[in-house]
Image: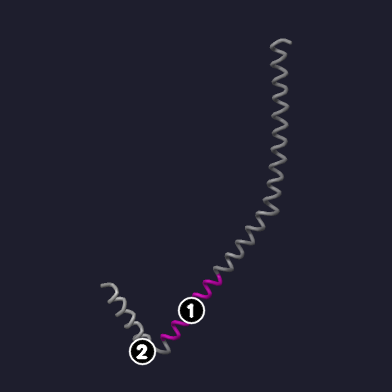
Amino acid sequence: MSAEKISENFLESLTETTTSIRKELDVIKEQLEKFVSQSVIPELDHATSKATDAVASARELADNQARNVSTRIISQPLMSIAVSAVIGFIAGRLSR
């Protein structure tokens, strides 16, 4: 065999191998896209929904606690002043 024939055979073989690898990569890419769309994305949507619900619950809890504190301050203003004074006194003593 001549050097040209060997070179041609090598190039043909290389081209066939490259084409085969590209086809296999395309199949793997399609499988990965299918897996992501069927498994990963729904789980992410579910996790996002749970996180949104948790944030809403925490926000509602914080709002309720703020209303409770406001209601107690309005209903017992002298007690609120006394508690604030004691906390201020203790904080002042601890900061020295």
- What's under tag 1, amino acid-wise? Gln
Where residue 45 appears, as percent x and y from the top left, is: 63, 59
Sequence-wise, which precedes: disc 1 or disc 2? Answer: 1
Q: Is residue 82 magenta?
A: no
Find disc 1 in the rendering and name its residue: 65
- Give the image location of residue 21, x and y in percent: 70, 33
Q: Is residue 41 above or below residue 21?
A: below
For disc 1, the neighbor class at 10 Å (few under 14, some 14 to 19, many from 20) is few
Side of 37 where 63 appears, left or right:
left
- Expressed as whole percent of the image width and height from the top left, the position of residue 22 reads 70, 34
Q: Quadrant of residue 82?
A: bottom left
Q: Is residue 36 left or right of residue 86?
A: right
Secondary structure of the residue carrying numbered label 2: helix
Q: What kind of residue is marked 2?
A: Leu
Quadrant containing the C terminus in the rendered view:
bottom left
Q: Which residue is mark 2?
A: 78
Q: Residue at x 69, y 24 (%)?
A: 14
Point out the stretch of residues depicted in magenta. 56-73
Q: Percent from the top left, x then y, of residue 87?
A: 34, 80
Q: Secondary structure at mark 1?
A: helix
Res 4 quadrant in image: top right
The answer to whether 46 is drawn above or below residue 5 in the figure is below
- Disc 1 versus disc 2: distance between alpha carbons? 20 Å
User: Dominant secondary structure of the magenta stretch?
Assistant: helix
The colour style of the image is one colour
* Placement of the N terminus among the 4 image quadrants: top right
Residue 58 magenta: yes
Q: Residue at x 47, y 82 (%)?
A: 68
Which residue is at a point 72% across and 35% down the rendered structure image? 23
